[in-house]
Image: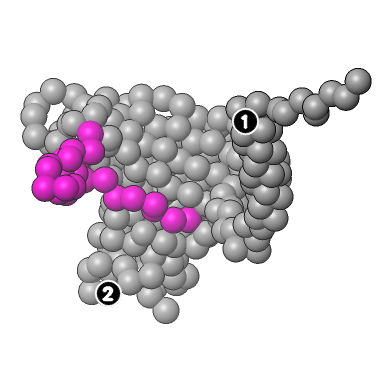
Amino acid sequence: MLFEEEQEPEFEIFSALLFNSLKAITFMFFISFAMINKPADEGKVDPKAEMLITVSWPDNNPDDVDTYVMDPAGNIVWYTQREAGLMHLDRDDRGMFKDVVLFNDKEVTNPLNQEIISFRGLEDGEYVVNIVHYIANGTAPLPVSVKVEKLNPTVKVIFYQTLNLTGTGNEQTAVRFTLKGEEVVNVNNVPKSLVELTRGAGAKGGAATGGRRPGAIDAGTGQFIPGSETGQ
């Protein structure tokens, strides 16, 4: 007895073709994904910092606060001289000034009030961190937090405290500390004016001792200029 060969339904044939096509597409996708080259590490720029000083005050506050830092060599970084020695003022925050920008025809406000000073390297000796109330828009004391972090070999908070600035021109020494190898010693806040040193550098023939040795701060470079008490 002869039997005719049973024909497969057209639907099953179509399903098989569709399934095989999907497998092929999936396989090609994974092959293509595997061939994508990873970004070259050579093109990366990793910012190197040994220490950070972060100064912040209340969001949306219009007051202008400035940070002054002196290193063991006598170099001073501040808003006029944003790079001195191995120190760099990453941003001079002026309160609400220039904190409003246009984006897609809409005004966008950055409420953050913060200044950061980074150090590309460290040297043994004393560092001085001063905070100045450059412009006050009210009479109430302004709370300003100051944090000093040594980053290597592990993160270590050297200082973290809140100061209360009392009005335009008020300068306070937040902290003075001495680095001795990996150790941090002699942490204190004995007052030491850095504004006076920078003002002395700006005056013709001006000089300042800096409390360490005779000399002055070059207003153009922020570098310490050795000298003598007789000006020679």
Q: Quadrant of residue 17?
A: top right
Q: Is residue 19 above or below residue 32?
A: above
Q: Quick check: can you spot residue 50? A: yes
Q: Is residue 141 above or below residue 153?
A: above
Under tag 2, what secondary structure?
A: loop
**Which range is magenta?**
87-111
Q: Position of residue 59 (x, y in %)?
A: 24, 29
Q: Position of residue 53 (x, y in %)?
A: 45, 41
Of the numbered discs 1 and 2, the one sitting upstream in the chain is 1
Residue 205 disc label: 2
> Crowdedness of circle 2 by 10 Å Cα count: few (<14), some, many (20+)?
few
Residue 36 disc label: none
Q: Position of residue 213 (x, y in %)?
A: 48, 60
Given residues 165 and 9, the one toward you in this image is 9
Q: Quick check: can you spot residue 26? A: no
Give the position of the C terminus as an image quadrant. Answer: bottom left
Q: Is residue 66 above or below residue 149?
A: below
Q: Residue at x 36, y 24 (%)?
A: 162
Q: Amino acid at mark 2?
A: Gly
